[in-house]
Image (cartoon, rainbow, N blue to C red):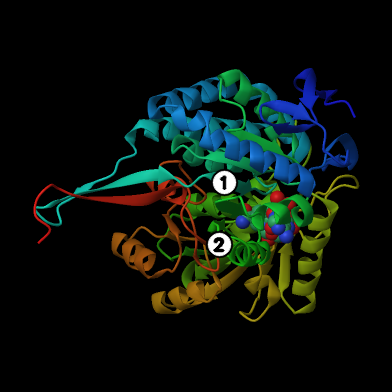
Amino acid sequence: MPLTTTLKTPVTGPYEQPTGLFINNEWVEGVDKKTFEVINPSTEEVICSVSEATEKDVDIAVAAARKSFEGEWRKVTPQERGRLLYKLADIAEKNTDLLAAVESLDNGKSITMAKGDVGAVIGCLRYYAGYADKIEGKTIDTNPDTFAYTRSEPIGVCAQIIPWNFPLLMFAWKIGPALCTGNTIVMKTAEQTPLSALVFANFVKEAGFPAGVLNIISGFGKVAGAALSSHMDVDKIAFTGSTLIGRTIMKAAASSNLKKVTLELGGKSPNIVFDDADIEQTISWVNFGIYFNHGQCCCAGSRIYVQEGIYDKFIAAFKKRAEQNTVGDPFDNNTFQGPQISQLQYDRIMHYIEEGKKAGATCETGGERHGDKGYFIKPTIFSDVTPDMKIMQEEIFGPVCTVTKFKTEDEVVAAGNDSTYGLAAAVHTRDLNTAIRVSNNLRAGTVWVNQYNMLSHQLPFGGYKESGIGRELGEAALANYTQNKTVSMRLAGPLF
Ligand code: NAD
């Protein structure tokens, strides 16, 4: 199979799309020469085929990453690691339009949102580039006869498995902290969205990273993903995706070589609106909280709680707002919501919508397909819901939310925490005391006040409860990719 193909997007014209596996800074076919098709979710048509990595390719990629970790990469100074990451960010910046277009084509997100993602990718890489020469240990005074210090060392060969909802951004969140701390990587992208990372791979070589530092493979979870999580020569695995697969990965790590594990998993996040909130602003944030990225956000504000004094007014205004969201062609600059990622996700979401209707919830708006081609679903709001309903408990990962009326602060904090998840939450109020009290009492890794979905590469992000283990972003993410070594040295002198 050729290792590149010429593709076109509505905004860039023709470009060269790599389709092979990126191992050791080279494009190669899979050993078994398998390929799979990549589907455009807006048209349901095949975009192209890419190489599929199997266990044999995983072995080759892990060996390349190991060789580099033990060899050339180890000799690269922290300052140089930072310079390489800055260079990578610069190349990405020059190619913003191309990267965004490929992301829209492959994932279906609107071109304006895709450009936002690329901006966030660049910011994230520069942030971690700056950390490369600031990784420090300590000297610790234990005894006058001893000189003891700690070193913060890289973990080694890291496998990283990412999902399809933010293909490039999840890629950057993973590689930034891993590379600045001196690890090497085998990255497996999601089978639904391999294209933007493959374009990015060429920039890795152009930036000057030594061969084997960052290897990027396309493939399926059950094959390449499983091979990585049970691999005996992978030192660490970082995963973003469903809680179900997070458990599988942890089990594989436990029954192989006890590789270190960090997980960023699902959510069913409460978005709480008090009577005193600025209703117009809040409606915008609630709308953005659930419908941004077509509801395909792990932190989506999918359980909305509204205090009784403004409930009726809120429902009417929110319904009107949701119906104004433009759903359609991702390459139209006015589009807010594109298609869901795949037929499978479309079917899963429609199944939840049917479950909600059958369980007796009121579908205030949406609840059906948009158009007749592509995996588009209208923004959907359910009211008259009860805590036992599936649509209140399970992550739908689509443009579907529930709205529940509440009376008191205690009641809504208990309801907000009534979930196996704990990724994010939000509070809308003009009262600072309410904001701080409720934020402190919610069991979630991130709480937004009078806003939603406002992530920053400077702020740690991750889950309480079954939403994950470890924190991404911010200084906190460095801990995911370093391990402490203690060196304790006896000074010359008598033994006791
Ligand atoms: P998934 O968890 O199956 O896939 C995410 C990644 O894991 C992909 O790269 C996939 O290839 C890989 N994977 C799958 N099975 C694996 C295995 N056995 N071993 C190793 N890697 C494996 O998610 P999905 O099936 O694409 O979506 C299902 C649900 O997951 C969604 O409806 C949503 O609820 C949730 N999800 C969450 C996130 C998030 O950001 N937290 C992202 C995507 C999906």
Q: Residues within 10 Å of mark 2 (few under 14, many from 20)?
A: some
Q: Quadrant of the C terminus?
A: bottom left
Residue 446 x %, y %: 44, 57
Please tell me whether residue 302 is drawn above or below residue 375 in the rendered image: below
Residue shown at 66% from the left, 70% from the top? 394
Residue 295 x %, y %: 66, 53
Q: Nearer the viewer, residue 76 or 344?
A: 76
Residue 1 x %, y %: 90, 29
Residue shown at 40% from the left, 27% from the top? 77
Please tell me whether residue 357 is drawn above or below residue 143 in the rendered image: below
Of the image marks 2 and 1, the number of the one nearer the N terminus: 1
Question: Which of the 4 image quadrants contains residue 383?
Answer: bottom right
| Label 2 CB sits under 8 Å from any ligand 1 atom | no
Residue 158's mark? 1
User: Is residue 144 found left or right of 489 in the rendered image?
Assistant: left
| Label 1 CB sits under 8 Å from any ligand 1 atom | no
Q: Is residue 405 visible?
A: yes
**Which amino acid is tagged 2?**
Leu
Residue 87 x %, y %: 51, 21
Q: Which residue is mark 2?
A: 258
Residue shown at 66% from the left, 54% from the top? 231
**Which amino acid is tagged 1?**
Cys
Q: Secondary structure at mark 1?
A: strand
Q: Give the mark toward the camera: 2 or 1.
A: 2
Where on the image, by quarter, is ligand 1?
Answer: bottom right
Q: Nearer the viewer, residue 375 or 73?
A: 73
> How many discs appear?
2
Residue 411's mark? none
User: Is residue 301 found left or right of 494 in the rendered image?
Assistant: right
Q: Secondary structure at mark 2?
A: loop
